[in-house]
Image (spheres, helix red, strand yellow):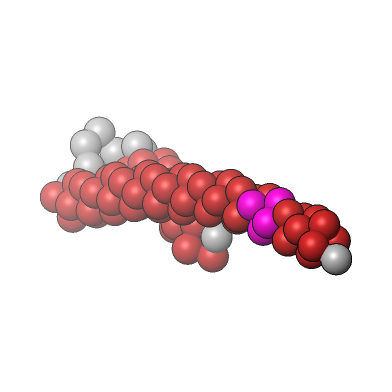
Amino acid sequence: MLLLKGVRKALVVLAIGSFLLLAFSSCKSRPNEEQRMKMEETRSAALSAEQKLEEVRQQRSEAESKVASKKSQLDKVKSDKADTENRVSNWSEDGQ
């Protein structure tokens, strides 16, 4: 969850930086080479952050799926245990 917040903050910072860069460079007819390089770097960083965010979301989804599966297994084992304890209790009572 902490990683997800960090990625989200990075996307916001990159978006604001891109907006400011475009706002200041739009006063001129064309951006100079340095501005173009910065815009490309910002774009690449934003794409990379979005890709990382998607990977984290996928990992989270897989982890949640595993947790749900394990909870289901645990519930079944608890039910089996209760049934077994019940049978042992009934068997002991029948034997006496």
Quadrant of the snapshot with the C terminus: bottom right
- Relative to 9, residue 65 above or below: above
Query: Is residue 57 located in the magenta-colored stretch of the structure?
Result: no
**x and y percent of residue 63 in the render?**
46, 53
Magenta residues? 80-84
- Is 55 or 76 nearer to us in this picture? 76
- Is 78 or 94 nearer to us in this picture? 94
Tell me: 54 left or right of 38: right
**x and y percent of residue 8 in the render?**
50, 53
- Residue that protrudes farthest toward the top in the picture: 29
Q: Can residue 94 be seen in this view?
A: yes
Residue drawn 51% across and 47% down?
69
**x and y percent of residue 81 in the render?**
67, 58
Residue drawn 85% across and 61% down?
93
- Is 2 or 17 nearer to us in this picture? 2
- Relative to 50, residue 4 above or below: below
Q: Quadrant of residue 82?
A: bottom right
Tell me: 79 left or right of 64: right
In this rendering, the count of numbered labels is 0
Q: Is residue 6 visible?
A: no
- Relative to 96, residue 30 above or below: above
**x and y percent of residue 44 in the render?**
24, 49
Residue drawn 60% across and 55% down?
77
Q: Quadrant of residue 26?
A: top left
Which SS does the magenta portion mostly show?
helix
- Is 66 or 3 nearer to us in this picture? 66
